[in-house]
């Protein structure tokens, strides 16, 4: 799979560092999500890296990896988000069509989420979302300084899995929904709830504007989340 240019520039420093630190322990390295689809929101999107290992990783290896990668410019991603996985006990994490192998072999079959697993994951998220948003809102109500930045980003990242799960619940194909870009999801949402679709559009427009603050993004994400909660 051809990677977006934003991801291609990070492949070499990431794979070089992983090989240097883990050596023969490294079975494969995979990126997934927006790093593959190119659906990047500059203040919010992570470059998600799954590191599959033949043996358990050690704390000293994480420290060594930090030394090699910490000065890497991850722009336009907000950060590089790794997840270390033991090959002998690899959980389902990946969606067909939304991941790419950077190093080594294809991930084992049990790491690919099935249609039913996507449905179950979405339903659990919709079940938990009201209490999650309520907890976020409580903390957001008096957030100041760096807490605004942390919470604004956190609240914004709640939205995408919720919208995906809602679209699946309303009868759309799970793997197709999980592979959709933000704009595609917003347009599909408008066919069932125009208010939520417009709230997502407003959130996306601001997320793609350079001078938008995390305070503004968090507020817009809350607006969309509140509308989503009325539908579930």
Image (cartoon, helix red, strand yellow):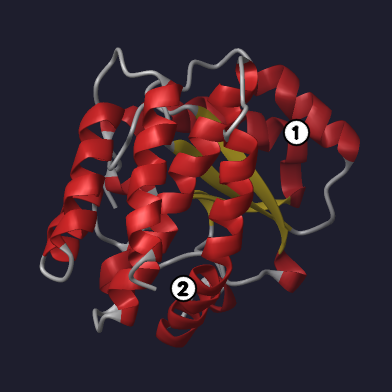
- For residue 32, the mark is none
Q: Residue at x 39, y 70 (%)?
A: 165
Task: Tell me where residue 170 sits by quadrant.
Answer: bottom left
Secondary structure type for disc 2: helix
State how far apart marks 1 and 2 are (Cα): 36 Å
Q: Is residue 60 above or below residue 188?
A: above
Q: Earlier in the sequence, mark 1 or mark 2?
A: 1
Q: Which residue is mark 1?
A: 21
Can the viewer see residue 133? yes
- Residue 84: x, y in percent? 70, 50
In this orientation, which residue lies closer to the viewer: 102 or 117? 117
Q: Secondary structure at mark 1?
A: helix
Asked if residue 30 is positioned above or below residue 171 in the image, the reply reads: above
Disc 1 to disc 2: CB gap under 8 Å? no
- Residue 191's spot in the image, x, y percent? 10, 68
Residue tagged by mark 2? Answer: 122
Q: Quadrant of residue 64?
A: top right
Q: Position of residue 133 (x, y in %)?
A: 54, 53
The image quadrant of residue 27 is bottom right
Report the side of 204 relative to 113 (left or right): left
Q: Which of labels 1 and 2 is toward the front? A: 2
On the question of residue 35 being in view, the answer is: no
Image point (46%, 33%), residue name:
11
């Amino acid at each position: 799979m051809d990677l977006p240019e934003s991801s291609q520039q990070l492949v070499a420093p990431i794979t070089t560092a992983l090989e240097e630190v883990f050596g023969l322990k490294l079975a494969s390295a995979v990126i997934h999500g927006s790093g593959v689809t190119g659906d990047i929101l500059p203040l919010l999107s992570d470059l998600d890296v799954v590191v599959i290992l033949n043996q358990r990783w050690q704390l000293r290896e994480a420290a060594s990896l930090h030394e090699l990668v910490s000065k890497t410019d991850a722009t336009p991603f907000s950060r590089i988000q790794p997840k270390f996985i033991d090959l002998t006990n690899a959980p389902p994490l990946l969606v067909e069509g939304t991941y790419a192998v950077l190093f080594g072999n294809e991930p084992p079959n049990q790491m690919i989420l099935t249609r039913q697993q996507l449905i179950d994951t979405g339903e659990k998220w919709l079940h938990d979302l009201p209490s999650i948003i309520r907890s976020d809102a409580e903390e957001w109500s008096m957030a100041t300084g760096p807490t605004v930045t942390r919470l604004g980003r956190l609240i914004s990242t709640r939205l995408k899995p919720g919208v995906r799960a809602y679209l699946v619940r309303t009868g759309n194909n799970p793997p197709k929904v999980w592979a959709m870009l933000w704009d595609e999801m917003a347009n599909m949402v408008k066919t069932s709830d125009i208010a939520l679709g417009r709230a997502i559009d407003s959130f996306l427009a601001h997320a793609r504007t350079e001078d938008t603050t995390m305070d503004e993004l968090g507020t817009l994400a809350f607006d969309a989340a509140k509308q989503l909660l009325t539908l579930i």
